[in-house]
Amino acid sequence: MRKVTRLGAAAAVVAAGAIGGSAGVVSAHPDHGGHHPQAIRHVLLISVDGMHQSDLNWYIANHPGSELAKLAFGGAEFTNNHTSVPSDSDPGGTALMTGGDPRATGVYYDVEYSHGTVEPSLIGGQPTGATCTPGQPATGGDVIYDSPDDTLPAVPDFLGTAGNAFPAFDENGSIFGGGKPADPSQIMNLQFSPGGANPSLNAGNFPRDPKTCQPIQPWDYLKVNTIFQVIKNAGLRTAWSDKHAVYSSFNGPGSNGQSIDDFFGPEIDSQAVEPDGTPYPSDTDWAHDDAATKQYDGYKVQAVINEINGYDHSGTTKLGTPAILGMNFQAVSVAEKVDSASTLVKNPDGTYSESPADCFSATKPDPLCLAGYYPGTTTPRPLLSSALDYVNNQLAAMDAAIQANPETRGTTAIIITAKHGQSPLDPNQIRRIQDGPIIAAINAAWTAAHPGSGDLIVAGTNDDLWQSYLSVKTQEAADFVKDYLWNHTAQAVDYANTGCKDPN
């Protein structure tokens, strides 16, 4: 704990998440107006996805006058927090909204497998051919609550790249008609629709309930309620902004997708366009070019500031400041893992260009494009340092909005945390391993030991971790996989793209 002061103009809780551990700061600014402490009536919850304890420590040490430093030194820091295991955008997000780990919530990843459901009718927009008879035992199947679950899953590449397509920025074509955003700032008018004639989500992609054969909406897949349900049931207003429409799952079971009064979820996996509608030259989505990611995060920041000011996220309808509101930042997460430009610059002629300019060129990119940390250290490279600066400045803008509003000044708690970190921080520790040959070898060893049993590993995910789901739900089967992994080596590739062996 750095220090604790009395509850003043803007109380704050700051927590930086990490794989295996995270930090937290319960902060209170000095009372700007000499007001007496008041009861907390609003909570601003922020997830700086990817931020570690070491990032928070480094930033505060090197920027003692920053917003993060003010929040930290104005309150209490918690340095022994832990993310969910596993952690990523989800189940990390679900853990924040429920206080539950995956065993309690039932959410182990946004792409997982369940023995208690029936295969979706669609996967990636393509028919699975899986049949379902109501009341029959569950057959087991994929559970995918991830992009692209939007109603419009495929928009042709704006640069005309053959065979390349993206999810829609506006989920269901309600803003841009499923086409190119000439003015991406119009995304602020996006309204989430949990059902009806033009739903934001394509329920055909969801797992089916064996009792009814109906799709299980993402909010109904959770086994426990969420903070939004508790607050909504108390008669208070709620709001949240996130990177996928499918994270409306935070509404919680039995909510009909309506416990978050103002949900704003522009699709981060859609094609990134500059403020004038020109596609980014990197020809990628908002999550693979940090200059674009900052622009994307900016829309959610504006949504939060509009809500602090008492409007809906679009800034058009006066509804009062929600009791709970917030968003996640992606800029730090992307800068930790994707070499890219850091800044979008407006040219004198009104066009835009990226800086550094050659991050996506065929030649060796500018060192300023490199993501993550200097090898062997926890010191951010310039790209990540820039992302931390960006987040810090946006937090300062939110805090300024809180101070400027008499309704929120002195009555708002700010919680800054991280759904997940990234690991390893040291690029020298990276070992990339193809899981396909390992899965095939485990299945072969299992069937050799259990003739006629079929494959042991029937599904899995290999996004930024390896999760395997077994056809046999016994401790013996789990131990078989564990013992195989510990007693066999695997071919790997290190940070320098050099082949190596991983011992277990």
Image (cartoon, rainbow, N blue to C red):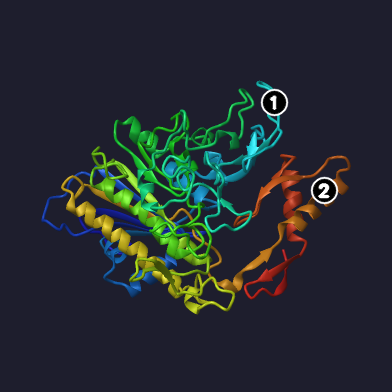
Q: Residue 363 vs residue 55: left or right?
A: right
User: What residue appears at the point 43 percent right and 30 percent down from the top-left corner?
Assistant: 255
| Sooner in the amino-acid sequence: mark 2 or mark 1 | 1
Residue 52 visible, this orientation: no
Residue under label 2: 446
Q: Residues within 10 Å of mark 1 (few under 14, many from 20)?
A: some
Q: Please name the amino acid that badge 2 sits on.
A: Trp
Visible in this render: residue 360? yes
- Label 2 – label 1 distance at C-alpha: 26 Å
Q: Secondary structure at mark 1?
A: loop
Q: Residue at x 35, y 48 (%)?
A: 326
Q: Position of residue 83 (x, y in %)?
A: 48, 53
Residue at the limit of the structure toward the left, as seen here: 34
Describe residue 351's horizontal placement relative to residue 279 as left or right.
left
* SS under mark 2: helix
Q: Position of residue 438 (x, y in %)?
A: 76, 57
- Depth check, mark 2 against mark 1: the one in front is 1
293 left or right of 32? right
In depth, the one of 417 and 188 nearer the eye is 188
Identify which residue is drawn at 43% across, 34% down: 193
Quarter holding the C terminus is bottom right
Query: Which residue of the protein is positioned furthest toward the top in this rendering?
Result: 135
Foreground residue, 447 or 171? Answer: 171
The answer to which of 85 and 257 lies nearer the viewer is: 257
- Label drawn at residue 385: none
Q: Quadrant of the N terminus?
A: bottom left
Q: Which residue is mark 1?
A: 137
